[in-house]
Amino acid sequence: MSLLSIHDLVAEFDSPSGIARAVDGVSFDVQPGEIFGIVGESGCGKSATCRAILRLFGGAPARIAGGRILLDGVGDLAALHERQLAQVRGRDVAFIFQDPLTALNPTMKIGRQITEVIRRHQNITRAKARAAALQLLRDVHITSPERRLDSYPHELSGGLRQRVVIAMALALRPRLIIADEPTTALDVTVQDQILRLLKERRDRLGTSIILITHDLGVVSQICDRMAVMYAGRVVETGPVREVLDSPSHPYTQALLAALPGQVGREQALTPIEGAPPSLISPPPGCRFAPRCKLAQPDCAIGPPPPLHARDGVSSGHVDACILNEVAHGAA
Amino acid sequence: MAQLDFQRVERRFPVKRGLLDIVARRDRIYLHAVRGVDLRVSPGDILGIVGESGCGKSTLARIGVGLQQSDGGQVVFDGRPLAGPDPAGRLQMVFQDPYSSLNPRMTIGAQLEEVVAHYFPKLPRARRAARVAEILAEVSLDPETALKFPHALSGGQRQRVSIARALCPDPEILVADEPVSALDASVQAQIINLLKRLNREKGLTIIFISHDMNVVRYLCDRVAVMYLGEIVELQDSQDLFGDPRHPYTRALIAAVPDVRHAQSLAEPITGEIPDPFAIPRGCRFATRCPFAETACQNPQEMLPLGRAGGVRCWKAIPSD
């Protein structure tokens, strides 16, 4: 039984030049205790997908325009009223933002912010909430937590702030954490610490995590399965080692080939020419086709191709390239 | 070809004092952004400067092109101490965010022509456009780009334009401060290829400032690692990545996630960069170093290593 199961999710944003479908028919499952990575370049819809799960559009003119978001034991989040969804946020599903400063109230001490989260959902005394907050800070390996409870966010370093945000996300023991680029603003040595912390949490308590990132290295380091998004759609998904070691969609292949470290110093890197399509009026057929080196005339016809299994292997490694489908059908 | 030479370069910033500090006549407190940096940039090299935020790499870059003055030591360019931006434009800089460094209300062509006119005043007006077209071709942009405004370009195209602008005076040294950090990986590759081509084909010397170890490893011939204002290791790129000597360099390399493997086996270093106002007296990395001992409380000198390299750690003496 999946913890989270997303079917054909569509999310739209109003813009001056029309309606942009930032998320256009996205489906994936997250299992209990799984770390699921979503990767893609800026504007691919990875963040919009995850914000749509909790409807955290931050005041942007956006809405869910289709699909279902089934959370085990709760039901379809897309069908919940705002008030019901507010109960799900934090309690069942917690969200970690890229910039910890925007997630913390600059005028409130850390301790007060954490106890407020706890006391909103649980009827316990202030003293007990403070003790719980202290334990949460210990859980995320913050040294001298007593002192930190009385600090303001600006007094902490970037890494410490992100630990505090994680501690707040863990406060209600959610079954699922959605982390949107949680380490992008941090230095690599600190990023390493935060990734280990998330993984440790999963290992100890079986918390599922959706990790959104543009960094394939981060996915490789801690995720179990992953989805690659392009122009509002998932183009490939499967176990991380399979997708990264033998990518089957041309976009995933191109993305990996563009990274330094894949070729020797004397070889040139292979950039992807062109730019992603407009999400207001995307091209017909496969959205990567205009930039794809392998594209055939058939690629630019009809609706965007769905995900389909590869070589009949049941590992769950699927992609949305019709050329692979043809190869598979002929075999 | 002119050589750029940093000699014991220092840069400190006074910390703002409150009224109480002034009344109580407390001493001024300084933040040392750059401390005793010795660095020789050989013509034709791509020199990488890596380090985490606040290590002083950007300050060093700005001092290197004369945009900022040093408080101690000097930068020697072409045999003379550098006292400001080079009037002939032989030292040029490219910044991380190309959008903020371009004029949004001028076409690309007009901006570039202005730069060409500044450095080559004798060039007839009619020839300027042709020169701009040449430079645009050099960074692989269509000639029509000259007619566009910055907002009509993609991030990658904008960064090409800012490189094109830096190329206008026909510089000898290009200092690029995190030029690909704001770009997606697929576009990053274009800019990296471009820089490499300019180096190989025109012999342009490049100082490449970055926090991305993968990019530096691919692009740079030599690499300096900075920590809290000091260079802690300097080696040829291959040696630095193949046999890093300083514990910080090792930690930095080990912390980079690799797409080919799952979690790295190396033990992570703990803690974060110390408060710049409470810097350890001896080795600055000692507070986070897994190998720290009592002797590390003494100030560390740069010990020679390999071909004009060095390492600032008494325990990292070469084994041979």
Image (spheres, grey):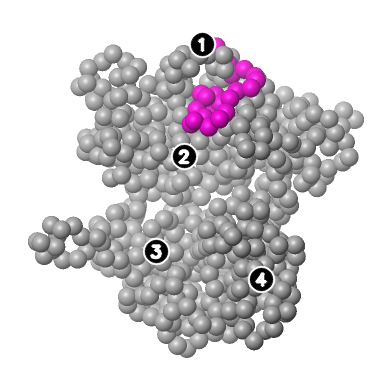
Disc 4 sits on a residue from what chain? B
Q: Is mark 2 on a helix, strand or loop?
A: loop
> How far apart are the two marked residues, 4 and 2, measured between alpha carbons?
35 Å
Q: Quick one: quadrant of the N terminus of chain B? A: bottom right
Identify the residue at horizontal 48%, vertical 65% (top origin): B49
Mark 3 — residue?
A: B56
Residue B25 placement: quadrant? bottom left
- Please check whether the numbered discs 4 and 2 fall on a single chain: no
- Circle 4/circle 1 CB separation < 8 Å: no
- Please check whether the numbered discs 3 and 4 fall on a single chain: yes
Q: What amino acid is found at the position of numbered circle 2 in the picture?
A: Gln
Residue B286 placement: quadrant? bottom left
> In this picture, which residue range is highlighted in magenta?
A51-76
- For label 3, count other residues whose C-alpha is less than 10 Å away and answer few (under 14), some (14-19) or many (20+): many
> How far apart are the two marked residues, 3 and 4, measured between alpha carbons?
26 Å
Q: What amino acid is found at the position of numbered circle 4 in the picture?
A: Leu
Foreground mark, 2 or 3, reads: 2
What is the number of the mark on residue A73? 1
Counting from the top left corner in percent of width and height, residue B141 is at: 72, 63
Mark 4 — residue?
A: B198
Q: What element carries label 1?
A: loop
Depicted B16 relative to depicted A81: above or below = below
Identify the residue at horizontal 14%, vertical 63% (top origin): B22
> How far apart are the two marked residues, 2 and 1, measured between alpha carbons?
28 Å
Counting from the top left corner in percent of width and height, residue B317 is at: 40, 68
Q: State yes or no: residue A99 in magenta.
A: no
Q: What amino acid is found at the position of numbered circle 3 in the picture?
A: Gly
What is the number of the mark on residue A98? 2
Foreground mark, 2 or 1, reads: 2
